[in-house]
Amino acid sequence: MAKIGTQGRLLSGLRWSRLEEPLGFIKVLEWLFAIFAFGSCGSFSGETGATVKCNGKNQEMTAISVQFGYPFRLYQIPFEMPVCEEDAEKRTLHLMGDFSAPAEFFVTLGVFSFLYSMAALVVYLRFHSLYIENKRLPFADFCVTVSFTFFWLVAAAAWGKGLSDVKGATRPSSLIAAMTVCHIQESVCNAGATPSMGLANISVLFGFINFILWAGNCWFVFKETTWHAQATSKESSAEQGAIDKQ
């Protein structure tokens, strides 16, 4: 009962009306779209494949299916290459490329954005008076917001390029080109289904949406800093001086 009472007091102390203001509303959007960004990238999985048919033999067509996904270390994903020669042994090949760096940076940034947005919302809703009175908090918030804006631009662009490379490395034609059995006359290789990359494409879109949100939030956070207050006071003094001269 005491625990429930403490939670009730904490919830009752939150000023939910702050969410109607731009500073609070944008933080909610940042929190949500950070989840969408790292969730859509981190949970992605796809499948590519091809078929191999040996000519002149009563052999069934061999279907090759290769699954891949986050963190996109494709060089660690094996698949069995069939053979058409009688004495040859099956070989284990791997997909080409390592695109884990941009993908992991993207997901990590999304997780940190989620955590920071949630912490900033708690401070803004529960300790708004402290946020206003302590001039260091708005300044720190502004610096962090500018940093996240820059990192989201870098992460979205880097993951967009990385995703383009992932598409090139996982298309069925790349799979066929990597198999030596497809380069001999005794076999016929055909491309399988092209991997569906819709969720990965959406993750890149969420990355740029996060950049726009954080960039827009810079202005509203800047308005809470002493820099904006000083600039406003100077403008007011200049206007007042012009009125007095008249």
Image (cartoon, grey):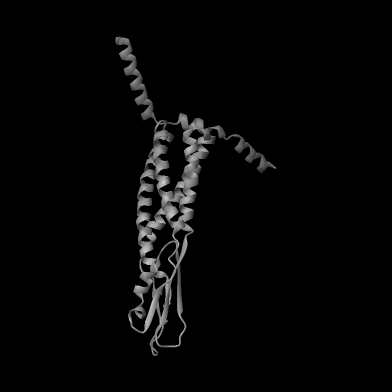
Asked whether residue 223 appears in the rendered view, the answer is yes
Instruction: Give the residue at x 37% y 74%.
Output: 176
Q: Quadrant of residue 161?
A: bottom left
- Judged from this view, the residue extending furthest toward the right is 1
Q: Residue at horizontal 33%, vertical 83%?
A: 185
Residue 181, percent from left and from top = 36, 80
Is residue 159 toward the left or the right of residue 15 in the image?
left
Quadrant of the image containing the N terminus = top right
Q: Is residue 87 above or below residue 166?
A: below
- Residue 188 x/y as whole percent: 38, 79
Q: Nearer the viewer, residue 50 or 145?
A: 50
Q: Where is residue 46 shown, x and y percent of the image?
A: 46, 64
**How many numbered marks does the figure carry?**
0
**Residue 131 drawn above or below residue 153:** above
Residue furthest out toward the left = 245
Where residue 167 sits, quadrant-wise, is bottom left
**Quadrant location, the C terminus:** top left
Q: Is residue 41 above or below residue 138?
A: below
Q: Is residue 232 above or below residue 86?
A: above
Residue 243 position in % (x across, y down): 33, 12
Please give the name of the residue rendered at 47% of the width and 39% of the height, measured from the top-left corner: 26
Residue 81 seen anywhere in this rendered image of the structure: no
Please identify the residue farthest to the front as the structure is shown: 56
